[in-house]
Image (cartoon, rainbow, N blue to C red):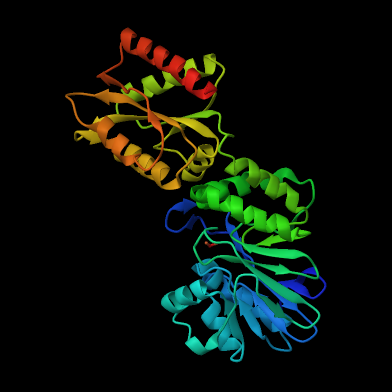
Amino acid sequence: MACLRSIAPDIHYVGAVDWNRRLFDALIPLPDGTSYNAYLVKGSEKTALIDTVDPSMWHLMDQLLDKSCTAGLDYVVIQHCEQDHAGSLPLVLKKFPSAKVVCNKACKDLLIAHLHIAEERFELIEDGGTLSLGNRTLLFKNTPWVHWPETFVTFLREDKILFSCDFFGSHLASSALFFEAGDQSFYEPCKRYFAEIMLPFRKIIQKNMDIVRELNPLMIAPSHGPIFKDPSMVMGAYAQWIDEDQADEVMVAYVSMHDSTRLMAEELVQKLMDRGLKVKVFDLVHADLGKVAEALVDAKVLLLGSPTVLAGAHPLAAQAAFLVNALRPKIRYAGVFGSFGWGGKMVEQIAGMLSGLKLELLSPVMVKGLPRREDYQQLDAWADQVVEKIKL
Ligand code: FEO
């Protein structure tokens, strides 16, 4: 029989740690696993469950609910419809036939579409609405686009605990329930998570941060990764990551087939380092996509290298350009470099793939075959240009 872990009196952790998951959304690598956090909040009159777990982990949650819900369950608050939080909802509703699903209208529509939840099971809440559990009160605030349109957070007023769902989360499997105050180990997994999930929504996150600041929580309990005993740690980091002016690095990402592009990349990186610039470098054949995304948080300049393949970019370079365009980072300048044998439209193709970004394209550096002395001189001039752009 499972034992209960509590984050405060009568507030139990009923989620699950997924130590072995290695991929999310069939795209995002999870080198450190993840967790699906769910919380049971008991009031003097009613009991509410906040979020569920990925269905693959239902057997663990089932045991914890058996242990913690001996007096039944009145409400299931679903803050976000994605399967890792809402996926076990049908099983919870089957286990507790009188429990109501508490969510906003947008979330209800998605839950009906994705999970076929019956209309009569819902109890809708408005932005700023409350739900009394007796001696405890849940306050709901819509926080759209962290990271779906229906997402909201739940504030437990009396305890000043914010249940923030994906907002402030991290894909980190850990036996630790908390990031203790001052523990900086949160930074890397939270930044990676921010880069992969939140980066495109920076401007809206700014508004959502204001909502959280106004609530002034004593504790932030996200739905992935450990709980923050000191919310200022992660909120301070988010403030830095969403700041449009805080990006001063050069990202060099390249793929090479027969070494011409690799030689150019290596020469370029050396020249950039010689000029004192902060550079992050990725050979796209071996790169961890999460690390690439993380580097985008701090990148002001992107230099993307590729050989010409079938008159266009190498597919790995095209994939990188597609992801950069989709994640909408702070990048203000981009340049394409690489090699060709007999022509092609690689530069135009990559430029088109980055068209969703408001950035200035540098003149490309394209080399026929293996680079020569004059090509390296061109890269030298390019590095000078990058220095000027970084200073702007
Ligand atoms: Fe953790 Fe958007 O789901």
Q: Position of residue 164 (x, y in %)?
A: 64, 62
Q: Residue furthest top?
A: 373
Q: Does residue 311 sit above or below 159 in this rendering?
A: above
Residue 331 left/right relative to 219: left
Q: Is residue 174 visible?
A: no
Q: Residue furthest bottom?
A: 98
Residue 152 at least partly seen: yes
Quarter location, residue 20: bottom right
**Residue 373 image position (x, y, % from top left):** 33, 8
62, above or below 331, in the image: below
**Vertical relation: 260 (above or below) 241:** above
Query: What residue is rendered at 66% in x and 79% in y?
Result: 63
Q: Nearer the viewer, residue 215 or 224?
A: 215
| Residue in the picture at 65% in, 70% down | 128
- Quarter occupied by residue 7: bottom right
**In this view of the protein, which residue sits in the foreground, 27 or 333?**
333
